[in-house]
Amino acid sequence: MKKSSTITTTTSMPTSPTLSAQTLSASKMSLSSSRSGSGSGSISGSVRSSCQSHGPIRPGSGCVDAIKAKREEIEIDTILEKAKFYTSVCLGTTAILSVFTFLFLIPFVVDPAISTIIADYDPVPVTCVVIDHIYAEGIKNCSWSSCREGCTSSLTKCHQLFVNYTRIPFSEWERNPRDLERVNWDVSYTKFLINSEGCGYPPTTNCSVFARQYGFSHIGEPFPCYYSRAYPEVVIGRYSWENNLYHLVLSLIIPNVLFAISIGVLSYWYCPCCEKACNKSSRVYAEKFPTKEDKLLCHSDEDDEMEY
């Protein structure tokens, strides 16, 4: 009796390794199926498994066509995802550049244009005469300048022009010249600037040309100028209401519109709140599961093959 008991115990031991092997194989199959389902072929794999549950897949059946259609959809989705990625990079770059461009335009375009609007220059040029021209060198001697190349550069050399002006339009002065000694000047010995800021950048601003045009040998010659109705002591040589407004509108609209469009598209694509607000449907953008129509198509094909 003792021998038989030992035999039975030894024969019952090998059953456990077989069970563990089966469990290991089942776990490996579940891991492989989960990995394959998470990849690019998850849709075709789900359709294939749903069709294989009712029988083997045969050529010419509807399941094969469904798998091919799903693969084509996967390829299209991959191309769309790549296009979306590159478009997102371009939009992000555009948004960043728009911010830096707008910050750059504020001191060079926006602020001067706004100050020009506040000064309220008379659009009709009046008559001016340069009465004094001072050329100075050194930072102490150049407290201001009629023309400066570079609005942020330090003044080491400067041209200082002083003018008298009368509100008689220059067109009327040309038709009927007056004697300069008998003219009643509205403002005398005031600073004369090339523009509202008194500075600019080449090639539009050249201080040497400006000084030769109005100073030196041209002192005492009448020329057209523009005075500020808000600050009568401010006189400039260049002014255009249309150009000033044109540059102001462009500098405000273009960077802000590009930034708003870029951020709006990126928010719509990647912000969950925006996507839920815009898309009220319960289906997500890329649903990687077989639809009811695909399952019914596979089931009907298998039923027809079984009857045949």
Image (spheres, helix red, strand yellow):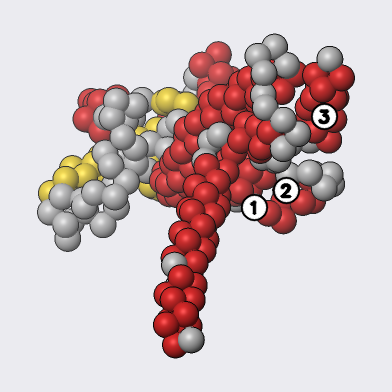
Q: Amino acid at mark 1?
A: Cys
The location of residue 56, given as percent across then percent down, is: 67, 27
Residue 241 is drawn in which quadrant? top right
Figure quadrant of the C terminus = top right
Label 3 CA crowd tier, 10 Å (few <14, some 14–19, many 20+): some
Tell me which numbered mark, 3 or 1, is placed earlier along the sequence.
1
Q: Amino acid at mark 3?
A: His
Name the element at disc 1: loop
Residue 275's disc is: 2
Q: Whole-Å distance between the Cαs marked 3 and 1?
A: 39 Å
Marker count (numbered):
3
Residue closer to the observer: 220 or 79: 79
Q: Amino acid at mark 2?
A: Glu
The location of residue 117, given as percent across then percent down, is: 59, 44
Instruction: Residue at 34% x, 37% y: name it.
Output: 200
Q: Which residue is mark 3?
A: 299
Name the element at disc 3: helix
Instruction: Residue at 73% x, 16% y: name it.
Output: 61
Label 2 CA crowd tier, 10 Å (few <14, some 14–19, many 20+): some
Q: Looking at the image, is mark 3 or mark 2 nearer the viewer?
A: 3
Instruction: Residue at 31% x, 35% y: name it.
Output: 201
Residue 271's disc is: 1
Up-down relation of residue 272 to residue 199 (above or below)? below
Name the element at disc 2: helix
Q: Whole-Å distance between the Cαs marked 3 and 2?
A: 35 Å
Instruction: Residue at 75% x, 18% y: name it.
Output: 62
Residue 175's disc is: none
